[in-house]
Amino acid sequence: MLRLEGVTKSFAGKHAVDNATLTVPVGQMVGVIGRSGAGKSTLLRMINRLGDPTSGRILFGDTDVTALRGRPLRAWRARCAMIFQQFNLAGRLDVLTNVLMGRAFHMPPSRALLKMWTDEEKAQALSALESLDMARMAGQRAETLSGGQQQRVAIARALVQEPDIVLADEPIASLDPRNTKVVMDALQHINRHLGITVICNLHSLDLARGYCDRLVGMSAGRVVFDDAPAALTDATARDLYGLEAGDVIGHAPPMALPAGAQPGFALAGS
């Protein structure tokens, strides 16, 4: 279980995240919603410890994540995989190598630097790519892929970390509708069929309502809504988004999968 206890992050005296307190059970898919600048990305980066809280604690089980340093912190970042809006792939490297970089958390830095992957690790990376219909592109340079394809490679890289939690920071912000569906289906599949907790920053309420078990709404750095998607009324959404509400409020989430449904791919062995 992930717990945030009074977590605050300040920049130049201004709170980007202000006294956030949350409990996320294992296996939940949580959508973090709110307008730009609400603190969503800062919150996820603190959970991964890419940024340190100014005050408060982040705990996972009995582990105080905010106290980790050195090798234990590196181990936490392996358990808490991060997927970014801009993919963060090495464009000149091939797809398979980009995915294998997710194994770097589990090996000495020297072996990762020399790209000394075992056959087992290569098979694991290919399996992750196959689950996302990307194995045929394993030898292709990442910079030649479309945005949706690159994001699927980033998800495969996260999978080979063997994480307990996947944090996705606006993973579909730059994608077209078709690739948006592919990526969101992939995240939902990881959550439902592998039991991995997924926390995903989303701008679209249609997507958040359709894919997530729970929504956390942020405004000016504070958590102002925390409930099931059905409890998010249009009035509450307008309070969250203000003048942006008309762009994000929707009622029919056409991209969502019904409970128990299979997306258009399956992870090897699942």
Image (cartoon, helix red, strand yellow):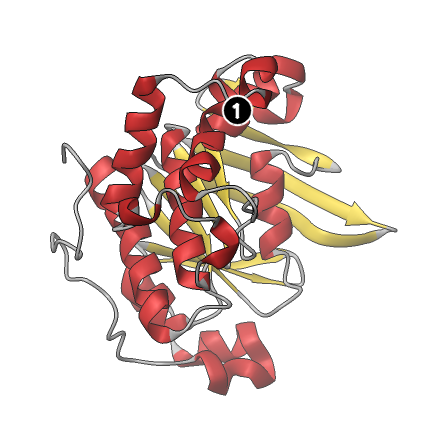
Q: In this view, does 96 lie above or below 144?
A: above
For this rendering, which residue is in front, 126 or 35? 126
Instruction: State the count of labels.
Output: 1
Question: Which quadrant of the structure image shows residue 65?
Answer: top right
141 left or right, relative to 182: right
From what the image shows, is residue 145 above or below residue 44? Answer: below
183 or 201, which lies in front? 183
Q: Name the residue under label 1.
A: 76
* Amino acid marked by disc 1: Trp
Q: On the picture, is 142 further left or further right than 64?
A: left
The residue under the point 75% across, 38% down is 54
Residue 140: percent from left, percent from top: 41, 48
- Visible in this render: residue 170? yes
Picture coordinates of residue 3, whole percent (x, y): 49, 34
Q: Examine the rendering and report whether any part of residue 231 can be seen.
A: no
Q: Quadrant of the C terminus?
A: top left
- Can you say whether 206 is above or below 122 in the image? below
| Residue at image point 60% right, 17% down | 109
Label 1: state its secondary structure.
helix
